[in-house]
Image: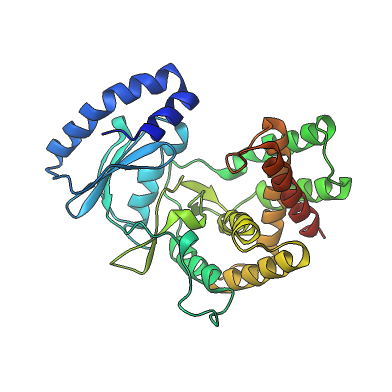
Amino acid sequence: MIPAAFAKATVDREGAAGTAWLAALPSIVDDLLTRWKCERAGEVMHGEVGVVVPVRGAVLKVSFPHPGNVHEPDAFAAWDGRGAVHLYERDDTHYAMLLERTHPTTLANHRPASLAVDAGEMATIAGSLLRQLMIPAPDGLPRMSDQAPAWAESLRTDAAELDHALPATVVDEALAVVDELCRKQPQTLLHGDFHPRNILRADREPWLAVDPKGYVGDPAYDAAIFLRTRAYYLHVGDGLTGNDLLQRLHTELDHFAEAAGLDADRIRRWTQLIAVQSAFGVRRQGSHHRAHDNAQLARLLDLIDHLAVALTT
């Protein structure tokens, strides 16, 4: 039942805890299917941290127990189907949910019917969806503002210790974003991982969000996560570089901001901070899941550095 690639990735990442969880996973799934009276209806799929079992009219998702997955059902419950898939059942002990079924097509592999379609179509789709997700956060969710002191300390440490090409003005701007935008944020429910692969085609609505983290904070952060990922797709998928890439990214930023009802400069500033954090994070780890060799890693770092500098005013 467990896809081999998922099993290997889980053991590589989690070690003995991953091995033990994988051993128990088939019985966990069987027990949940019986309890929720579900009938399997397709091959098991998987993401990075969990499996998805198609059943008639829904999907069963079971994730590896991880702090990042704790508040996923809380976010779904708060949205109640508005902009995101419906949550039918939950078992927090096993990090399991019975969710509304969607199609496998994501916004990442969506292509317009005509090349004449505005270049900002994907950003408009995502921005309109995020507008639906921006609701007052329920009690008990982690606040992104609590991370501000650690973010500031990490930026200063990485700038001093790592071998990097970012000018001091770029790091200073990222620190200013932490001070001015991160320390005090709106009490809005955030998705937390709002990128094109977490936006899926659906029957009830054209697009629905999946895989939220469930934070409290500034929705411009979700917009920045989307744009950071779009920059990678535009570079690798569409071959855009230099000013062409930046012009396209600014176009998408404007479309997203208008569709979501957010301030474009606020989104730009969050995106700049995330780019700087990514530039340091990849260097600190010496790897990235999108880079399969040193040459790809070097090109990815060049892209991230270029974005961090270009988004700095």
Q: What is the residue that sits farthest to the bottom in this orientation?
A: 116
Left or right: 2 in relation to 124: left
Q: Position of residue 81 (x, y in %)?
A: 32, 60
Quarter of the rendering occupied by the C terminus: bottom right
Q: Between 308 and 141, which is closer to the camera in this rendering?
A: 308
Left or right relative to 50: residue 291:
right
Residue 272 position, x and y percent, is 72, 54
- Does residue 111 sit above or below 273 in this rendering? below
Could you tell me residue 165's position as x and y percent?
Answer: 84, 43
Residue at left 77%, top 34%?
Answer: 158
Is 307 positioned to the left or the right of 79 in the image?
A: right
Residue 85 in the image: state x and y as whole percent.
Answer: 33, 56
Q: Quadrant of the N terminus?
A: top left
Left or right, residue 266 beside residue 53: right
User: Which is nearer the eye, 2 or 48?
Assistant: 2
Residue in the picture at 82% in, 29% down = 161
Choose top left, top right, bottom left or bottom right for residue 71: top left
Q: Is residue 216 above or below residue 206?
A: above
Specify whether residue 128 is in view: yes
When the figure is inspected, residue 5 is found, relative to residue 108, above or below; the finding is: above
Colour scheme in the image? rainbow
Identify the residue at the far right of this view.
168
In the foreground, 97 or 195: 195
Quadrant in the rendering for residue 113: bottom left
Given residues 71 and 58, the one toward you in this image is 58
Tell me if residue 64 can be seen: no
